[in-house]
Amino acid sequence: DLAIGNVREKKVNKLIEEVIEEMGMEAEFSEYTWEGLLAALDNGQVDIVTNQVGITPEREEKYIFSEPYLYSYPALIVKKDNDTIKTFEEAKGHKTSLNISSNFAKIAEEYGIEIVPSETFSKDIELLLNGKTDVVINDTVAFADYLKQKPDTEIKIADTLDRPNIVAIPIKKEDEELKNNIDKAIKSLKESG
């Protein structure tokens, strides 16, 4: 069995389910906050985490990563009726809510956007719609997924950055065999479409 950590409120990516099936394994999923996700991997509670974890130099020092399975782009999300904030530059001095340990926190800091700590993307959207924040920074995939679930939500993408967030499965460095098996499964699934 493979113990997998996933963030609360987040559906497990269909590709991850297919990877596990391709490997011929059973999975036991556990839910964590974003902050607890990598800690669960570190302390051995889970074997892998599957929540759109972007590859960063800091994370590469600590983990090995599977073949990438997703490329997404940072997006600046605003209310549909907001015509004053059209770019990341114009968001300077405004408020966003996001997880302070996410890749998006670095982007907020880079553009001078004030961060209100939050744990989930749905909470970020709620704060935006209630006027507690002005923008949300997340990625194009999360935005599309959210609107698929809640198509009447009055939000839009004001701007995107042309720097892909490369997403893969982080694995403990000593689990090279698991990484190789996951990579084989991902490659096999990519080849079969």
Image (cartoon, helix red, strand yellow):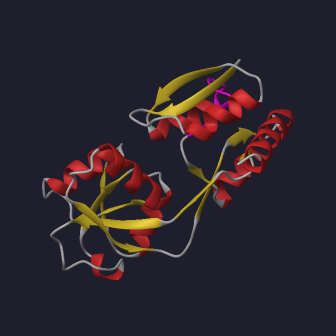
Q: Is residue 166 magenta?
A: no
* Residue closest to the eye, 170 or 160: 160
Image vertical order of residue 165 relative to residue 53, above or below: below
Q: Left or right of 132: which side holds 95?
A: right
The residue sitting at 62% across, 32% down in the picture is 17
- Picture coordinates of residue 132, whole percent (x, y): 16, 56
- Picture coordinates of residue 97, whole percent (x, y): 30, 55
Res 115 → quadrant: bottom left
Q: Left or right of 67: which side holds 41?
A: left
Image vertical order of residue 173 relative to residue 135, above or below: above
Q: Is residue 48 magenta?
A: yes
Q: Left or right of 167: which side holds 103?
A: left
Image vertical order of residue 42 relative to residue 53, above or below: above
The residue sitting at 38% across, 56% down in the picture is 143
Give the overall secondary structure of the magenta segment. loop
- Picture coordinates of residue 87, whole percent (x, y): 33, 80
Count up the numbered dots: 0
Quadrant in the picture for the N terminus: top right
- State which region is magenta: 42-50
- Picture coordinates of residue 82, whole percent (x, y): 17, 72
Q: Left or right of 53: which side holds 102?
A: left
